[in-house]
Image (spheres, helix red, strand yellow):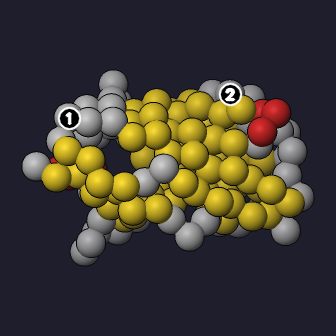
Amino acid sequence: QVQLVESGGGLVQAGGSLRLSCAASGSISSTNFIFMGWYRQAKGNQRELVAAITSGGSANSADSVKGRFTISKDNAKNTVYLQMNSLKFEDTAVYYCCIMLHGGTVPYCGQGTQVTVSS
């Protein structure tokens, strides 16, 4: 059983920054997952992958956030971060921390945290 607890969402003006955190606990170590990542879902839209990082530390992000968002992880704390800079109105969404475990078929996600960017 894995638990994911997201924090750091909120209201910010366009051009501002936020840092999301995702603390993982339960049956997890720094090596027994394929990737951890952040998805987001805006109203009326499908959930999309924003950024992900593998257990080995390889990171990737969607074209829409490249150069603005950075994903990182702290193995000692089993925590993944998403640093979001130069936020835009279109970044407004619920952001979900998700993990793909070895043997899993779909990523397991937390409850999400709201990010609202005012224009």
Total marks drawn?
Answer: 2
| Amino acid at circle 2 | Gly
Residue 72: give x, y in percent of width and height.
Answer: 59, 31
Q: Residue at x 66, y 34 (%)?
A: 73
Residue 74: give x, y in percent of width and height.
Answer: 71, 32
Task: Describe residue 67's horizontal placement relative to residue 4 as left or right.
Answer: left
Task: Describe residue 88's horizontal placement relative to residue 105 as left or right.
Answer: left
Confirm whether residue 97 shows in the render.
no
The quadrant in which the N terminus is found is: bottom right
Q: Which residue is mark 1?
A: 15
Q: Which mark is residue 78?
A: none
Secondary structure of the residue carrying tag 1 is: loop
Q: Residue at x 26, y 47 (%)?
A: 12
Confirm whether residue 80 shows in the render.
yes
As rendered, which of 17 and 27 lies closer to the eye? 17
| Amino acid at circle 1 | Gly
Q: Residue at x 89, y 58 (%)?
A: 27
Name the quadrant containing residue 59: top right
Q: Which residue is mark 2?
A: 57
Q: Residue furthest bottom?
A: 44
Label 1 vs label 2: CA separation? 28 Å
